Amino acid sequence: MATQLKTPSDVRAQVSPEEWERRVDLACAYRLVNHYGWDDLIFTHLSVRVPGPEHHFLINPYNLMFDEITASSLVKIDVHGNPVMETPYITNPAGFTIHSAVHMAREDAHAVMHLHTPMGQAVSAQSDGLMPLTQTAMLIRDEIAYHHYEGVAVDLDERERLVADLGTKNAMILRNHGTLAVGETVGEAFIRLYFLERACEAQIHALSGGVQLLNHPPQGAPEKTREQGATGLKMVGNMLAWPALRRRMDRIDPSYAN
């Protein structure tokens, strides 16, 4: 399928410079998800809002692996998940159910990222959810909302309940399902998702040694850590960590920007 795509210059010529930059950021995020081993074959999605009043979004082609995605191959869709620009790729409108709910309910949620990693799913299946066992967990824990499992997320009626559960939080654990993060930029959403996934991974490793051997932080430490990270995560993510991640992907495989 990839050989059927128009040349990158053709796609780039059809979109604004602002949209192209978001395409490059989002394609980089897809490659990074693959790099960290967080992808789930062709499933799950990362999306970003296209600048402008049309309520259009960019999302992955449904038939490409994450390490194949480029800025040009991203599909531009409307709020219903239907393509609004010519594309040779398959789209999955049902897969946009979760993303469309968050994008439309939250004006600040320009980027929405959802994963099915084993560690994220494992924590989502634990009754306590994310526990304040590590510094990473304490930094992100106050940003997390929870949404109970209702089956495969193709029921449009679920959108109202999902956004109600998310509220003003910027991350979510979807019970028995996976993780989700939002941000005003692709970089911000990705860094938030990175912290959430790392915290989940550390929790599963810690619990593997037995609950009786856990060392819990002293009283007040989780709250202090939360306050310390309240503004730092967003600033560091946008200004420092995301540019560094872009450079990493440039070294590994710069073809994402095509």
Image (cartoon, rainbow, N blue to C red):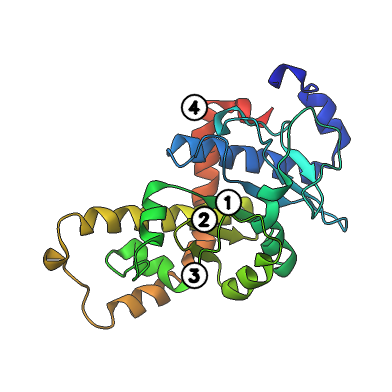
The local crowd at label 3, few if under 14, some if 14 to 19, many if 20 or more residues have their Cα within 10 Å, is some
- Residue corresponding to mark 3: 146
Describe residue 207's horizontal placement relative to residue 228 as left or right: left
> Can residue 26 be spotted in the picture?
yes
- Residue visible at 38% across and 61% down? 125
Quadrant in the picture for residue 58: top right
- Residue corresponding to mark 4: 252
Query: Marks 1 and 3, how far apart in space?
Result: 23 Å
Q: Are marks 2 and 1 in contact (CB under 8 Å)?
A: yes
Q: Amino acid at mark 4?
A: Ile
Q: Amino acid at mark 1?
A: Gly
- Residue corresponding to mark 2: 237
Query: Marks 2 and 1, how far apart in space?
Result: 6 Å
Query: Marks 4 and 2, how far apart in space?
Result: 20 Å
- Residue visible at 39% across and 67% down? 139
Q: Is residue 96 above or below residue 158?
A: above
